[in-house]
Amino acid sequence: MKTLTSFVIIIFLQSLLVHIFCLHQTSSNGILEYSSSTFPSDFLFGTASSAYQYEGAFSTDGKSLNNWDVFTHENPGKILDENNGDIAVDQYHRFREDIQLMTFLGVNSYRFSISWSRVLPRGKLGGINYSGIKYYNILINSLISRGIKPFVTLNHMDYPQELENRFQSWLNPEMQNEFGYLADICFKHFGNRVKYWTTLNEPNQQVILAYITGRFPPSRCSSPYGNCSRGNSEIEPFIAAHNMILAHAKAVNIYKTKYQREQKGSIGIVVQTSWFEPISDSIADKDAAERAQSFYSNWILDPVIYGKYPKEMVNILGTALPQFSSNQVKSLNNSKVDFIGINHYTSYFIQDCLTSSCNAGYGAFKAEGFALKLDRKGNVSIGELTDVDWQHIDPEGFHKMLNYLTDRYPNIPMFITENGFGDLQKPETTDKELLHDTKRIQYISGYLEALQVAMRDGANVKGYFVWSLLDNFEWLDGYKLRFGLFHVDYTTLKRTPKESASWYKNFIEEHVNRRELVDN
Ligand code: BGC
């Protein structure tokens, strides 16, 4: 009897250990069910958002109009559903309810951005709007009181329209001073409670859309990249990015010299990344894939981390690429980031267009590094294609991307500041279908699995944020492209959990519980 009891106890303990330590177990539908406890106890699990896409209240309490307010009001036809962010998901008024949703998920962090025109309606001129400061103070305090760490982006695509009208915003070095001023005000008012800052969200993606293809405001581009009434796609994006990189450096410098010692927070920058897989084994295609990286995330990260542009850009762009003066290099070197924020959604095949001719397409031209981005090689696609033309489900590409970043920027701490799946709402799509979001679960679980593999390979990742907490205003796709873990009914603004919300909640719970078991 005694032996039988010991046997049962041993079997029980064994299965418990398997449950705790098993590497991962994927069910037949490809959804990750268990994984090892790769995540350290201070790992941040969160959801991400941005001011224009969430807040609404576009002209409330002293906020001025920003570039997106003006762009969507003047060009409704450029937005899929002819809508705008005037109300968005009304987080300005509903943040308390949204924090309850975060509490349901069990996240320990929330990424949001500051609306520049809410805090400084006229930029450096005209003073601080204290209603804006009050809003963020209450938001920050409410998050902290629920055990949720604010992870704050100083700027996510939106800026006071006045800065565009007065001096062409990012095309003018004056924007560096304006951004430094915004940063200083935010560190001063919020920095005693905010321990994670990022300067700019995706300068690379922002300048591509605003100054190469011209699809985002201020709608500047030239042929063959896009159809705009003004702009130069082979010159202006590089000027705008240069100003953004230096504006970033200015903000980091202000933080490091005036605030960090006392406030004890950390600061980084967020870039958009995609994995670029050479379409063949030829040297030309492999070089093209490397060029594609250089003209995308390395464009920003190399200067921020090494104080210079990638050599592929220098070679192709020549004098069109601004140079960093020795003072600017000094400023970059004195403003080392504490971490980098990685937004990642997709992969592409890359075909060389430098040594052989390509069909026109995304990536084929000089300002894009002559590296054509394709979703298929013959009839083989890069991952699983979706209804969203740019989103291809390829977790292995994410794994490769993290290893690539780890090789290029050894040991740099990283946060996955965005990763998520978009459902394109068609006229026939029902709410029931949107709530039953198996594809999103499959996507997120696959990418979380890839993240863990990369971490075991040595990627120094400190946190992961799903894009997004709620369905929200998805730029040119308006409200038709839904990324939320919670569904938003845009007539009533009611939030309803999708199946992915419960999945993410369980995933976090599993990992936190497992960490506790391991820690004990
Ligand atoms: C941006 C978000 C956007 C998301 C999905 C990211 O590039 O930072 O603002 O909603 O992609 O398209």
Image: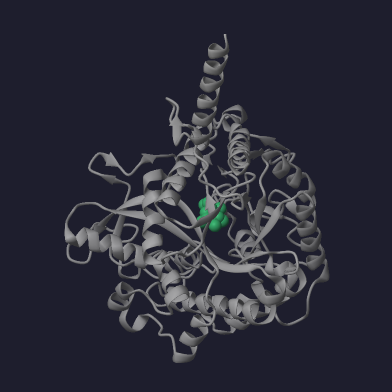
**In which quadrant of this rendering is ligand 1 seen?**
bottom right
Give the residue displayed 77% in from the left and 71% down from the top: 189
Horizontal side, residue 383 vs residue 258: left or right: left
For the residue pair 102 and 284, the one nearer the viewer reads as: 102
Q: Is residue 144 above or below residue 264?
A: above
| Quadrant where the image shows the C terminus | top right
Q: Position of residue 180 (x, y in %)?
A: 63, 79
Where residue 168 sits, quadrant-wise, is: bottom right
Q: Residue furthest bottom?
A: 326
Q: Residue furthest top?
A: 1
For the residue pair 362 and 351, the one nearer the viewer reads as: 351
Q: Is residue 23 above or below residue 472?
A: above
Give the residue displayed 33% in from the left and 63% down from the top: 292
Note whether residue 142 is visible.
yes
Horizontal side, residue 253 vs residue 314: left or right: right
How many callouts does the rendering have?
0
Give the residue displayed 44% in from the left and 65% down from the top: 208
Where residue 355 sits, quadrant-wise, is: bottom left
Note whether residue 199 is visible.
no
Q: Position of residue 231 (x, y in %)?
A: 45, 74
Q: Is residue 382 above or below residue 183?
A: above
Q: Position of residue 332 (x, y in %)?
A: 50, 81
Q: Position of residue 242 (x, y in %)?
A: 47, 78
Horizontal side, residue 391 vs residue 498: left or right: left
For the residue pair 33 and 75, the one nearer the viewer reads as: 33
Q: Is residue 408 above or below residue 249?
A: above
| Quadrant where the image shows the N terminus | top right
Give the residue displayed 43% in from the left and 31% down from the top: 30
Q: How is the image coloured?
A: one colour
